[in-house]
Image (spheres, helix red, strand yellow):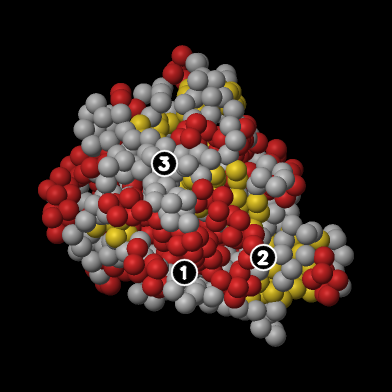
Amino acid sequence: MSAEDDEPVNTICPYCGVGCGIKVNQGDDPGDVNFMPWGEAPVNEGRVCIKGGAATQVVDHEDRLTEPLIREDGEFREATWEEAYSRIVSEMEGIRDEHGPDAMGFFGSSKTMNEENYLLQKIARRYGTNNVDNCTRMCHASTVWALRTSLGAGAMTNSMADLEESADVLWIQGANPGEQHPIANSQYFRQAVLEGATVIQVDPHANKTTRSFEIDETERHMHLQLNPGADIPLLNVVLKTILERHEEEPDAGWIDEGFIEERTEGFEDLKETLEDFDKEAAAEEAGVPLEDIELAAEKYAMANNAAIFTGMGMSQHTCGVDNVQNEINLALITGNLGKPGTGVNPLRGQNNVQGTSDVGAMPNVLPGYQLVDDDEARESVEDVWGFEVPDEPGLTNVEISHEAGRSVKGLYVMGENPIMSEPDGNEVEERLRSLDFMVAQDIFMTETAELADVVLPATTWAERGGTVTNTDRRVQRMRGAEKVHENTKHDLDILMEVGSRLFSEDEFRFDDVEAVFEELREVCPIYHGMTYDALGETGIQWPCYEEGDEGDQYLYADSFDTESGLGQIEGVRHQPPAEVPDEEYPLILTTARLEEHYNTGTMSRRSPTLSRQHPENFVDVHPNDAEEYGIEDGDMVTLRSRRGEIEVKAQVTEDIKEGVVWTTPHFAASSANRLTNDVLDERAKIPEYKAAAADIAVT
Ligand code: SF4
């Protein structure tokens, strides 16, 4: 690291999944670090949003954890690292002896790096359990499921760089890049629009994306403001319209018959699903005029290249997998896959949200998405690790929280804050209180760490090196400046020590972070060809199977990575959200994040620049609802669901649909997740954050 010679280090912004490069400038003292633009950064060429520019503000924050803490008689006391490690090892061994290995759960984090998550999941597997998961479960587990099973890889099919040259239509559904991926929006999306691309936004909320392209004010772009949870009816209207028009004008190019014939299977199933489909009723269910959906269908189908961008408005539903499958259906029947400017592209929320799953911090897959119940794949990993891995998928993170104090007795949390990030936070808090033992490894005393038995002070993103993988599969190196607090430790060093003490030095002691990456790439086929040298300053987009491969800007040029090599079309039918409005809770609550805050706010609430923009939570209420409930703009209101209530300031605005209220998860006392529903998509086990029944009243 070049901090030794006081040169700024090139690293990656710790916030969203765009993966912007920034420089960290090391001043005279360890705590004296500040942001500098990195003009040659591959993704962003020096541009950053407000979060990136403020990222170094929390590195030397007065709230930093600086010493290990151990709970004794209900209170924390400072402890030595030796005491902390001894307690962790004896408690974890005790839990395994008494209750078996599945009584422990492990939470990785997309705020930490590939090497760290790799080592955490290796510890879990060596302990004897697949109960290891990460926050990807909360944001895109359903997207990953649908993409992996129908196309082959659980990731963006294309790249941000594809767009500006090639895309004619950007179909953005349930995502708000103007707010959550600002540089993707202002750089890549904007450039595509300047080159002539049309934006079709599908979202219940008018937001920064709407305003950044003046979508509501032009005829060229469209905003389909649908009801939360009505994505399948809306997309089925799109699909049905395309099929009907193709019947009327077979040569007009409504569908790509050659592509369907040669590269897909399941088209007949889709046609059958839509045979008796009632477009008028579905448009009404969606809350969008039928002719608007038909026009959007025409714009998409008639584009040379149309790219779909999908976000948590799609994934965080009990029908999340089906929602994304329907986007895949749309892309497949129109031949919008396997070439630049097309695809189905999840916009990922955190700087390492792709990598955390890539490296196997998930209960059903090992590094490189190799299934734990695939004997051949599992044995190939076991050969490298030298120990057996359980062959049944473990519990997901929401399931682990549900089981806390029941079948799960202990929890190891690295960089996560489940009390605020998981739905039904009040219940999560109660469950975590009933654990026998919890370790929290973090940079601040989070709401979750408050309940832990051992708290380990970790270094921040700016103080350590490793790799992260951004939203378009680009594995990039992070580099650290000097450590601010002497007695903090890098996450990787903590895990090496815990693993070595619990098991053996041979398995868990590495010379440095690069040595961990070397083992990772040995067991992770999609990373196999990468070395630290090859990653250099630009990174590599996986898959990279052999040294010398340059990676792929877009996937599936020749075939899909499914068993048959064909893309899987599968018709899906509407399933309403698990909770719909009723007399007691007559509104639909939906949630989303703000540009100036980051998930549970652990870092962004402590950043003066960011918290100044939004110091407190608020709820968007439509003027007609405000009138009905006697709410004035700025009133404090109580927002209730079956799981709890929060007090927030009302913002009366036509940005939100009538009958829907919209708020955020960033603020501890008023987090939306005190209210959200913890019901799961059956396959992907992602919770339904985006639709719950709610009520509102002036406080
Ligand atoms: Fe950081 Fe994302 Fe902003 Fe880029 S767009 S500076 S990665 S928060």
Q: Residue at x 47, y 26 (%)?
A: 42
Instruction: Determine whether the residue tagged by mark 2 lies in a helix, strand or loop.
Output: loop
Residue 540 can be seen in this image: yes
In this image, 438 relative to 297: left or right? left
Q: Which residue carries the number 2 mark?
A: 289
Few, some or many residues within 10 Å of mark 2 (<14, 14–19, 20+) = some
Residue type at mark 1 is Cys
On the image, the x and y values in percent for residue 575 come to: 49, 75
Residue type at mark 3 is Asn
Picture layout, residue 661 above or below residue 84: below
Instruction: Determine whether the residue tagged by mark 3 lies in a helix, strand or loop.
Output: loop
Q: Give the mark nearer the N terminus: 2 vs 3.
A: 3
On the image, the x and y values in percent for residue 419 come to: 54, 63
Q: Which mark is residue 158?
A: 3
Q: Which residue carries the number 1 mark?
A: 319
Between circles 2 and 1, the one closer to the viewer is 2
Q: Quadrant of the C terminus?
A: bottom right
On the image, the x and y values in percent for residue 489 come to: 42, 39
Residue 26 can be seen in this image: no
Marks 2/1: CA distance?
Answer: 23 Å
Between circles 2 and 3, the one closer to the viewer is 2
